[in-house]
Amino acid sequence: MALRLVTDFDLRKDALPWLRAQQAASPGTRARGGCAGVLKNYCESLRILNVERNGNIIYTYKDDKGNVFFGLYDCQTRQNEHLYTFEKDLQVISCSVNSERTLLAASLVQTTKEGRKNEFQPGSKCLTLLVEICPVNNVKVLKAVDSYVWVQFLYPHIDSHPVPENHLLLISEEKYIEQFHIQVIQEGGNRVVIKSSGHLPRDRVAEDFVWAQWDMSEQRLYYIDVKKSRSTLKCIQFCGDENFNLMFEAPLDISLSDSGFKLVNFGCGYLQDQENLPKYLSLCVFTNRTGSLCVCYSPKFDSQEPITYSVFYFHKGYSKTFTVARGSAQSRMTKGITFLNLEYYIAVYLPGHFFHLLNIQHPDLICHSLFLTGSLVLDSCSGKLYRVLLNESRLLQSLWHTRPDWEKMAVLHCLLSCGQDPQFVEAKIIQWISENISACYSFDPIQEFIIASSYWSIYPETSNMDTLLPYSSVLTWNTEIPGITLVTEEITLPLMKVHSFKNYWEKLNANLEYVKYSKAHLHYNNSVVRREWHSLISEEKTGKRRSKVYVRNILDNAVKVISNLEARNLVSEPRLTPLFQEEDNHQRLLMGLMVSELKDHLLRHLQGVEKKKIGQMVLNYSSKLLDLICQILETSWRRHNLHPWVLHFNRRASAAEFEVFHIMTRILEATSSLFLPLPPGFHTLHTILGVRCLPLHNLLHYIDNGVLLLTETVVTRLMKDLDNTEKNEKLKFSIIVRLPPLIGQKICRLWDHPVSSNIISRKHVKRLLQNYRKQPQSSVIDKASFSVEFLPLNYFIETLTDIESSNQALYGFEGHDNVDAKFVEEAALKHTTMLLGL
């Protein structure tokens, strides 16, 4: 299963041994002649009551007389502590302790045994008590009513010092919530007592609600009131003092009028599973630090109907309703749907039928969510407290073994967004790509990996990044997922009731504002970079160029990216692949342009973020792109055990080199369509492998179609490494005639061959005659030096000699001797002899 359950607390392992030790040390137990009966009662009655904001766990147990004990397990020290004992046979409904562990609130029900009466308050069913426990001093009755009551202390966000006032929520089954304000004073050392316990101030927080959920970590109360058959979700944020604010109201298109009364996260009381509470109806609110707000809802259903649940993505402005085919006709319906918050995902499962992981950051693409069948059971009555995590190893296994493309994409994104060790996850995904390069038909795995991993590498740095950067190479997904029917609808956005926002509320409000006002698609793409890059390359070919300052700034961006990449890779092992060993100005221009355009894009749309921070984010993002390409190539290189000698042309290509060449071609395809830069040296390495691996006609086809680029480094190696056999001559000539003019002029000088000489002489003569004007013949020319009695050739040589003499022979090539008329004469004679068959 894709979830991993980590046991943070187990009553039988973490509390029961301590209870045994306490019982064994009790004099009363020894006097009664043993503790077996007491321990049996402990085991049978031991259960968790509540988990407080600081992680401390309150539990209860009874002795053989029915006396109720309250214990606390400190999650930091992993020590147990006895809080209080009621020497009466009572059933605990709810319990909470304040952060200083000086006050205990408990809601209890008198057990119905013959001869027993409620000694606290005759005639009442449920008692809500407030107890001073440091030390044990006083018990105060807060409520004595016939309806059930739940209690919960508020925990201030700053626990660095004791607070003079505590705040306690009372949640009544009669559909109201009150907040009590309890002032405490310290007397005689550590003795803490309630000040003015005769009358405790209280506020009415909410009323007329049918459902409520407590968010302990963020100190928020969500509740739904139903008026005129309209359900409205409201949220109250509690602050460090007694203040609380109604943050928003949001209409919910669901029917709860006949659903009874339901509480979520108010302790672990036994009433949550009683027959009088509605079965199978599930409703939960989930948020995360990125400003998302999701409401998950599943109505009642019977065994004959399809299973339906809805998710309201308020931070996106729409809802999705899923109708799911049952996993197995034989599976019994033992529980309703359970929803779990996994930060970037919501887990939805029905034991024995299905398990879904819904991507809440990018719910627009259904292929980013994972839909599986199977079962998972969380036993809330087992006395174990679970921390639910995504099972990274199982997800990696499914990446290898799953078949549908939508599952592969969903698993890939799930791993990248939620992986505990990003470097390990990336390495495993790259390994999967290398071994399954052609396994996907609906998307390019290299493209998806590069885009998604680069996105997630800087996503946590600021909010709204999912609206500004591409997170997938797939724009739409129209393929149906078997067994799932999906309906998407627009919803009314929450109405924010407070206008001064901080932390989560600021991010949620920003998301809502984006949905409300942004009609344009703000995701960055490289279309502007594409146009500008082609313009610069075209200007370079024609000899024109922008201002040197502009080009220098672009190239400086590329230098920063490469330096940033090298700095990040200092701790890793040295790379085998010979990249970054040449300038490759075209790739540097592309790299620098992308940095410039991406920075401008984020500066336009990221309000309130420092320019320096945005600049660093862009550098990190661009470096990550290049690094991922290098990692894919490095993994393939190491997997096939290649060595630097593959860079020589005088060896035959191995099967491993064919594999690496294929992967490099796929990398090139992936980056070309997205117009992403490649590491300098990539094209050189790719073409060298192409020359070694491909027959000549395939090689020339790849070159003519732009798949292989003839860099100066490649052609220079080619001319130097290969001898002049007939096969090699054909290859060299085919390469030379395809070279750009500027590179061709240099390369021809490196090949000592009649073909090269012929090309040199032709180009030289062309340059000389381009601007030639007839001049009076110079008397300086020594005609006797020409021994050829072929008048047209004599006249041509005389003309060239005259031009060279007039221009001081300045038409030579850089780094070589001037091409003089004598050389042209010899080349022309040799060429004529070959044509005449002499």
Image (cartoon, helix red, strand yellow):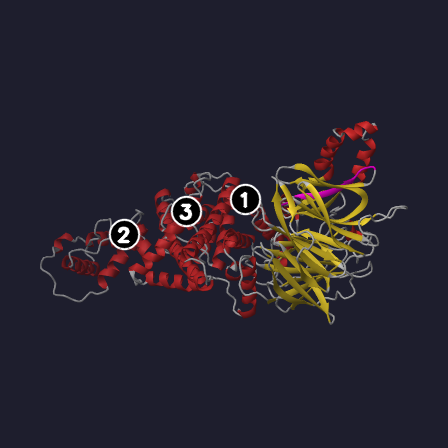
* Contact flag, marks 3 and 2 (Cβ < 8 Å): no
Residue at the limit of the structure toward the bottom, as seen here:
228
Q: Nearer the viewer, residue 770 or 554?
A: 554
Q: Nearer the viewer, residue 53 or 8?
A: 53
Secondary structure under tag 1 reads helix
Residue at the limit of the structure toward the right, as seen here:
114
Give the left or right position of residue 368, taking residue 17 as reference. Answer: left
Residue at the limit of the structure toward the left, as seen here:
779
Give the vertical position of 479 relative to 438 (above or below): below
Residue type marked 1? Ala
Residue type marked 3? Lys
Q: Which residues are magenta?
A: 54-64
Residue linked to disc 3: 727
Residue linked to disc 1: 427
* Contact flag, marks 2 and 1 (Cβ < 8 Å): no
Residue linked to disc 2: 830
Q: Nearer the viewer, residue 117 or 411?
A: 117
| Earlier sequence position, callout 2 versus callout 1 | 1
